[in-house]
Image (tube, rainbow, N blue to C red):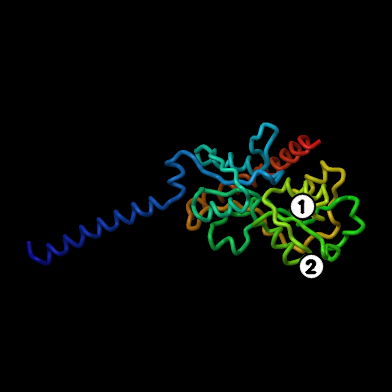
Amino acid sequence: MTKLMKKALILAAALMVLLGTLSAVQAEGNLLDKIKAAGKIVVATSPDYAPYEFLDLQGNPVGSDISLIYYTAQQLGVEVQLEPLDFDACLAAVAMGKVDLTVSGMVPKPERAESMDFSDVYYNDGNQVIVILKEKADALKTLADFSGKLVAAQNGTLQQDLVSQQLPDAKMEPIAKIPDAIMMLKTGKVDGVALASVVADNYVATHDDLVICETPFEYNSLGVVMAAPKNSPELIEALNLIIKDVQDQGLYLKWMEEAIELSNAMNK
C-alpha cells in the first residue's frame, strides 16, 4: 500500500468519524426527538387567563389552550407535564430552554422571536380592550379619559405594551395574575384592566358591576401562537401540522366555547 493510499484511507476514516459525530450532535439537538424519547412534553402555561387557561373548582388547569396542549401531546404520542407559571416566567422558561413549549394565549411579538420560535397562529385574539366599573362608564369612554388614571396590565404581555404606548398619560400597574387585577378594579385600587377582548368578555359576563370601555386600543391582531425554544424547526413543523388539523376540524373554537361555558358557570 502506498503512502498516498494510506493517507486517503485515513482521511476517509476521519470523515466517517466526523459525519457520525455531526449526526449524533444533530440528533442530540433535535428537541422533537428528545420529547419523543422522554415520552413527555413539558409545557409552561399561566392558568389565570380564562378562557384560554384557568383553574377549575378542583384546582386543575383547564381551558381552550389546555385542551390544545393535551391534543398536541396525543398527536405526538407523549404525555403532558404542565408547569404552571406566571406569564413572564413562561416566557423566560421557554427562552432558556427550561420547558419544551409555552402555550398561554401568547401573541407573536417581534421582539419575542429573538429568543423563541413560534408556531403558526391557532386563534385570532380580536380586539384589545379595557375593563372598567359600570358606574364609571360615562366618565371613561375614550382612551384619553384614562389620563391620570391607574390601569392594570399583566407583566410581559401585549396589553402592557398597549397601555404604555396608547395611554401615555395614564399610570400603569403591573400585575402577575389577572384575577388579582380584577379584584383591584372592583375594590377601587385601579381604574381599568387591559385585556384581550375574549378574556374581557368572560369577566363582564359574570360580573354585573363590570363593563368594557367603548373605545378599544388600536390594534391589528397578530393571532395567538405556541412558542418553543429557539432553533427547534422539527418541533415547530410538527406543531404546525397539528394546528392545521385542529383548524380543519374546528376544534379550537369548540374548546373555546366549552371553556367560556365552564368559566361562566364557575363564576356565577
Q: Position of residue 264 (x, y in %)?
A: 78, 38
Residue type at mark 2 is Asp
Q: Quadrant of the C terminus?
A: top right
User: Which residue occupies 22% across, 59% down?
Assistant: 14
Residue type at mark 1 is Ser
Q: Residue 111 or 77: which is nearer the viewer? A: 111
Residue 96 drawn above or below residue 76: below
Residue 138 drawn above or below residue 59: below
* Earlier sequence position, callout 1 versus callout 2: 2
Q: Quadrant of residue 4?
A: bottom left
Q: Is residue 183 left or right of residue 82?
A: right
For disc 1, the marked residue is: 197
Q: Position of residue 185 (x, y in %)?
A: 80, 50
**Under tag 2, what secondary structure?**
loop
For disc 2, the marked residue is: 169
Q: Is residue 24 left or right of residue 133?
A: left
